Amino acid sequence: MIGKITCLVAVMCALWGCNSSSTPNDDVPDARPRPRPDGGPPDGDVSKAPSVFFLHALSGEFNEVDLTVGDQTVDDLAFGTVSDATEVALGEGNVTVEVREADADASDVALELALEGLTENKSYLAAIFGDEDADDDAATAPRLLLVELESSAVVDKSEVQLMHLSPDAPATVDVGELGEAGALDPEYATDLAYGESASASIDNSPVQNDDPPRADDLNWGLRDGDSDDAPTARFEGDRLRDGTFIAALIDSEETFDGDKADIVILSVNADNEIDSESVRLEKALPVVP
């Protein structure tokens, strides 16, 4: 009986081979996905074009704009609002955003802005900002500021990306919680330069017995980064809860001692997207002594 089994095994090995499951077969290619050096999906996975949400923060007379990115369009984007997600095909050339005043002819392109730094399978906020009438070499010339959207499963804190997009505000600003006697305590951004962004972490943990009570409402102050004076503008609204947010300073019709900026607050969800219903605008208010 044992001899018959041995013969059967020999026949099977001759027909199908006898490689052990723990020993790799050099004749069969390894089909396991391999990570890519550019951070994209492993080889073998389907790549997805980057998703871009556009924020209209362009100062000037264009209250609404139309955008064209490749074969994608965004129509009637109002100042201070954010578009739905736009999938941007990368291709081999540079990605350009054409900006027109809303309802203008297709040939009437007011601005062409380069959209750089996109990666497949990621989501971004692209803020269009600057003075639409400024010369190309001016500090306030129109341009794009790109921020990757990355939600964080945070507890007892708000992770905030602050963006300075207002050409009529001071060149650098300080932003923080407006405390007693006009102090910013804590400060969330110090010397935040125009056209740049900075990360801040806001504590939402329960207040301990010896700590002062935490305000239930947002109460931020804005100060010239080159001045030691008290803040001249403030923002009120609902306090940010646990999660990931973007807070962008944009141009404002209100002016308080030269600090001219409103603030747009956007919430980033677990899918690294911006829900248009979460967008809110907080108007600048004067600081009451």
Image (cartoon, rainbow, N blue to C red):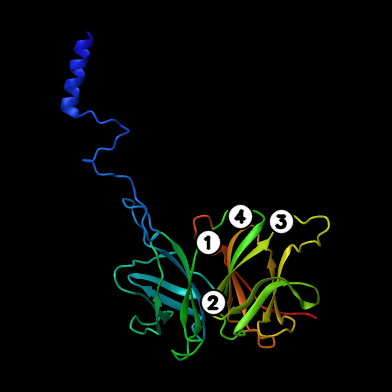
Cα separation, mark 3 vs mark 1, equals: 25 Å
Query: Alpha carbon of mark 2 to alpha carbon of mark 1: how far?
Result: 23 Å
x and y percentages locating residue 235 in the rendered image:
68, 74
The circle drawn on residue 275 is 1
For label 4, count other residues whose C-alpha is less than 10 Å away and answer few (under 14), some (14-19) or many (20+).
Answer: few
Q: Is residue 134 left or right of residue 13?
A: right
Tell how many labels. Answer: 4
Q: Which residue is mark 2?
A: 196
**Mark with earlier residue (3, 1):** 3
Quickly name the residue at label 4: 154
Whether residue 115 is visible to the viewer of this picture, yes or no, is: yes
The answer to whether mark 3 and mark 1 are in CB contact below 8 A is: no
Q: Which residue is mark 3?
A: 205
Relative side of 87 to 1, left or right: right
Q: Where does residue 286 sit, x and y in percent of width and height? A: 72, 81
Gap in Å between the C-alphas at discs 2 and 3? Answer: 29 Å
Q: Three-letter amino acid code at disc 2?
A: Glu
Disc 4 marks a residue whose amino acid type is Val
Q: Is residue 84 among what the camera can see?
A: no
Above or below, 262 against 19 in this view is below
Q: Residue at x 72, y 65 (%)?
A: 217
Find residue 281 and report its horizontal and vertical position in percent: 61, 72
Quadrant placement of the N terminus? top left
Marks 2 and 1, the one that precedes in the sequence: 2
